[in-house]
Amino acid sequence: MEKAQFMEKSFYYPVSWLEAQQYKYQLDQEGIPYSIQSPLDLPELEEGKLAIVFPSIPLRVYVWVRSLFYRDGLRYPDFS
């Protein structure tokens, strides 16, 4: 469901390219909205990493996402 370049961005998980592919599959299966960004989009990322970025989502969905990544997401920076 990788969509919206224009979706509101709330939090993210930095992952490797290989992990991104695996997470993408699982998130698509669950129908959870997200986008994937590179270090060009999100300068805080280490080189060679991608960010799986989420909008604000309902708590029950966040609990599922958190269990998928085994940790809390990082707050998406405010670039305004």
Image (cartoon, helix red, strand yellow):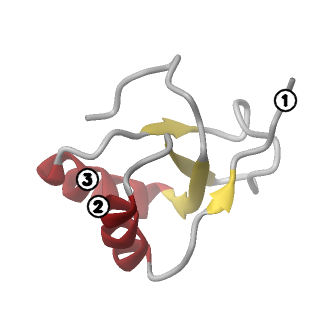
Q: Is residue 47 above or below residue 67?
A: above
Q: Amino acid at mark 1?
A: Phe
Residue 72 in percent (x, y) is at 56, 73
Foreground residue among 56 and 54: 56
Give the number of callouts. 3
Report whether 15 appears left or right of 31: right
Q: Which residue is mark 2?
A: 22
The single residue placed furthest to the right in the displayed view is 80
> Which callout, 1 or 2, points at the residue further toward the start of the chain?
2
Q: Is residue 8 above or below residue 63?
A: above
Q: Which residue is mark 1?
A: 79
Asked which secondary structure carries label 2, the reply is helix
Q: Amino acid at mark 2?
A: Gln
At 59% from the left edge and 36% from the top edge, which residue is drawn? 9
Foreground residue among 27 and 63: 63
At 33% from the left edge and 33% from the top edge, which residue is drawn? 2
Asked which secondary structure carries label 1, the reply is loop
